[in-house]
Image (tube, rainbow, N blue to C red):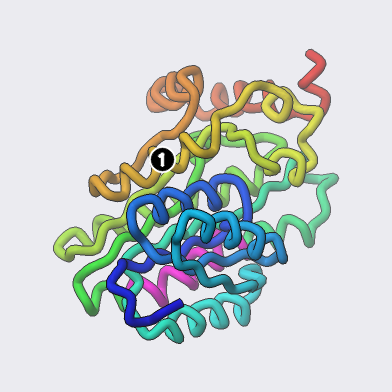
Amino acid sequence: MNNESSSPLAVVTGASSGIGLELAKQFAGHGYDLLITSETERIEQAAAELRGSGTKVSTFRADLRTYEGVEALYQRIRSEGRAVDAIAINAGVGVGGPFLENDLQSEIDLINLNVVSVVHLAKRVLKDMVDRDEGRVLFTASIAAEMPAPFEAVYGASKAFVLSFAEALRNELKDTNVVVTALQPGATETNFFHRAGMDDTKVGSDRKSDPADVAKRGFEALMKNKDHVVAAMTKEKVQVALGQVTPEKIKAEQHRKISEPGSADR
């Protein structure tokens, strides 16, 4: 990538597929150069797809579950020799199933990616943005942040953290020109549920949102300086709205009905 480019630069994590790739397409379609990252070699396929539209794209493979991986990504960002105009901190993973039966290391890896790396990367990038008094940060949370999430207990808690973190940072930075927005997707047609081992659940087998639509709404919310956006199907939006006045134990039961193993056949 030419570091003398006059185009703004956007960084997108978890950009090899799904919502992350679609977010990268949104930035590309609005004139941004891209630095996209993922742990897997699929990031190169994503880059080739993005370059097909004439976008300048560079890639970096990093395991953001580790401190070293986040630091390496930040150094790669710095090596661009240019300001980051926007970053979508999107990389995340789910683990479905009963907490007592799930693999502990898988859940610790989830926390490291969904929570620890989010804090770590935000700490590095936001300081640079505040020093310039300019920049935009999109955090991918989830509608799962709004309710207890039985059979996705650690995932739901991680996304509640991200939503709270994003909203707190937005308040802290309200007197700057740095924008912080939280994207809250509902169930989305990606590989998320398969990777989380949730193919036999109701939420895993039901119709889901188009990731391109989710990304479009997230991008638009970021550009309009919105606090957050719920990018979900109508029924999920209703659930989120009702959740504001619904007791937590009832919301937990509602979530259980769609996330419990075997619920796809009920």
**Rendered view: 129 above or below 162:** below
Q: Where's residue 154, x and y in %?
A: 65, 48
**Residue drawn at 76 percent across, 40 percent down:** 194
Name which quarter of the figure residue 16 lies in. bottom right
What segment is highlighted magenta in the picture? 112-126
**Rendered view: 137 above or below 206:** below
The type of residue carrying mark 1 is: Lys
- Nearest the camera: 205 or 96? 205
Q: Residues within 10 Å of mark 1 (few under 14, many from 20)?
A: some
Q: Where's residue 207, x and y in %?
A: 64, 22
**Residue drawn at 41 percent across, 40 percent down:** 216
- Nearest the camera: 158 or 192? 192
- Would residue 170 be visible to someone looking at this image? yes
Residue 100 left/right relative to 236: right
**Residue drawn at 60 percent across, 54 percent down:** 92
Q: Is the stretch drawn in magenta largely helix, strand or loop?
A: helix
Residue 182 left/right relative to 15: left
In the rendered image, the residue lying farthest to the left is 175
Residue 27 left/right relative to 135: right
- Nearest the camera: 112 or 44? 44
Question: Which residue lies under the disc numbered 1?
Answer: 216
**Residue drawn at 41 percent across, 73 percent down:** 123
Q: On the rendered image, what quadrant is the C terminus found in?
A: top right
- Would residue 167 be visible to someone looking at this image? no
Indicate yes or no whether the magenta region holds residue 187: no
**Rendered view: 34 above or below 27:** below
